[in-house]
Image (spheres, grey):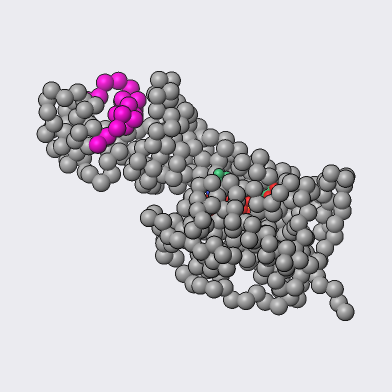
Amino acid sequence: MTRPPAVVVVGAGPAGLFAAERLAAAGAAVTVYDRMPSPARKLLLAGRGGLNLTHSEPREAFRARYEALPPHLSAALDAFPPAALRAWAAGLGEPTFVGTSGRVFPEAFKASPLVRAWLARLAGLGVRLVMRHRLVGIAADGALTFEAPEGRVDVSCDAALLALGGASWPRMGSDGGWTTLLEAEGVALAALRPSNMGVELGWTADFARRFAGQPLKSVAIRIAGRSARGEAMITAQGLEGGAIYALSAAIRESLATQGSARLCLDLKPDLDGAAIARRLAGARPKDSLSAVLRKTLSLGAQQVALLREAAGGPLPRAPVALAALIKDVVLPVTGVRPLDRAISTAGGVRFDALGEGFELACLPGIFVAGEMLDWEAPTGGYLLQATFATAAAAAAAMATRLGLPPPVPEVGTW
Ligand SMILES: Cc1cc2nc3c(=O)[nH]c(=O)nc-3n(C[C@H](O)[C@H](O)[C@H](O)COP(=O)(O)OP(=O)(O)OC[C@H]3O[C@@H](n4cnc5c(N)ncnc54)[C@H](O)[C@@H]3O)c2cc1C
C-alpha cells in the first residue's frame, strides 16, 4: 500500500487552514505548524468587527479594488469567487448576509463559531495542528526547521505551503520574520509596508484632545487623482477608517515620491459648492458660525473644528468662500501609522518569484499563499477573499504536483 503524500503547511491563519482542508480532503496527510499557542488569531481579531468575509459587488468592480491586480491573483479570484467563499462558510453552518454597504458577513457577525466548526472539520479530515513551532530554516532540499519548546525540529515532506501572513498586528502571530529566511534563499520580495493604515496629520493639541474618537461621516477624500467616500475617524495622530484606508497606496506613493502628501476632504459630497453657498446665505444673521453650519448643513462640532484647523484661523463668513472651504479641506499628511498598527501589509513575495501555480521558482516543492504575497486591497472583504482564493489556488497546484485527484469545482460563480 502506498502512503499518502505528506504535506506541511506553515501558518495556521485562514490561508494555511484553507489549503490544509483542501489538501486533506484530496487525500494528503497534512500537518499545520504555527508559532503561536492557538490557530487563526488574526481571523478571530477580524471577527471583532463582524468578520467582513467578502463583498457582494459585481466582478469588474470587485477586481478593480486590487492595486494593479496581479495575473496570479486574477486567476485565483475567478476560480474562487466571493460566492464560493460564502458557500464554504454556509457549509460550516455559518450562512452569510449582505450588509447595507454591500459587505458580506456571517450571520453570527463574529469569527469564533466559524473557526470552531472549521477546526472540528479539519480534525475530522485528520489534519494535525502543531502549535508553538516557529519556522526558522528552509534547506535547499525543502526540509524545514522549526524552533519548538523542546528545541530544534527538522521536518521533511513531499510539498510545503508557507502561509505566514504579513507583519501587521504582530501580537497575533504574523510578524514578517519570514522575510529574512526567504531573502536568504534568493526569493524576490517587495518591501513590507503598512496598508489600510491611519495617517498622521499633525493636529493641534487642543483639536486632538477634544475630537479624537469622533467620526467624520459621509466624507469624500481625494489625493493624487484618487478618491474614496465613506467614514473617517479622528484619532490623536490624524485620521483612520475606510475612506482613508482605500487611499493607502496613493498616500504612501505620494509620500515616497514627492516627500509630501495632501488630503483634500469634501465634508458635503452630495451638495455642490453653489448649493452649499445658497444654504449658508439663507442663515439667520444673528446665529454664530457654528450654529449656521449646524442648522444649514448638519455639520457637527468636529467638522467645524476641522474647518478651523485647516484654515489655521477664523473661518470666512462669506458664503461662497466658506462653501469652497467645506468642499476642499486641505490637510497635509505628516506620516502614516507604522506597519504594526496597520490592518494589513502591502508587499511580500513578488509574483514573479512564483513559477507555475503558487510555487516558489527557486525553491521547488514550496508554495506560498495569503497575505504574505505581494498584493494590496482596501478593507471591505477583499483581504480575506484574496487570502482564501490564493490558498485554494496553491492547494490545487500542490494537489496536481502530488498526483492527488483534482479539487471538486467551486460552488458558485460571480
Ligand atoms: C484588526 C484587523 C481586522 C481585520 N478585519 C478584516 C475583515 O473584516 N475582512 C478582511 O477581509 N480582512 C480583515 N483583516 C485582514 C485579515 O485578517 C488578513 O488579511 C488575513 O488574516 C490574512 O490571512 P493569512 O492566513 O494570510 O495570514 P495570518 O492570518 O496573519 O496568519 C499567518 C499565520 O502564520 C503564523 N506565522 C507567521 N510566521 C511564522 C513562523 N515563522 N513560523 C510559524 N508560524 C508563523 C502566524 O502565527 C499566523 O498564525 C483584518 C486584520 C486586522 C489586523
Residue 144, can we see it? yes
Q: Would you say residue 8 sits in the magenta stretch? A: no
* Quadrant assignment, res 143: bottom right
- Residue appearing at x 38%, y 55% in the figure: 100
The answer to whether 15 is drawn above or below residue 88 in the figure is above
Q: For the point 34% across and 30% down, which residue is it?
A: 302
Tally the numbered discs.
0
| Res 77 quadrant in image | bottom right
| Residue 304 counted in the magenta span | yes
Q: Is residue 79 left or right of residue 303?
A: right
- Residue 300, image x and y in percent? 29, 32
Question: If the image is split into quadrants, where does the N terminus sit?
Answer: bottom right
Q: Nearer the viewer, residue 330 or 266?
A: 266
Foreground residue among 203 and 15:
15
Whether residue 73 is situated above or below residue 48 in the rendered picture: below
Of residue 51 and residue 378, the one placed in the foreground of this image is: 51
Residue 331: percent from the left, percent from the top?
A: 38, 32
243 left or right, relative to 278: right
Q: Could you tell me which residue is drawn at 24 percent across and 36 percent down?
A: 298
What x and y, as percent, mark residue 66?
Answer: 50, 55
Report x, y in % for residue 382.
Answer: 51, 56
Q: Residue 393's image quarter? A: bottom right
Residue 204 appears anywhere in the view: no
Task: Work out whether 276 lies above or below 28.
Answer: above
137 is higher (above) or lower (below) than 29:
above
Residue segment shown in magenta: 298-316
Q: On the picture, is 250 further left or further right than 38?
A: left
Give the residue displayed 45% in from the left and 41% down from the top.
241
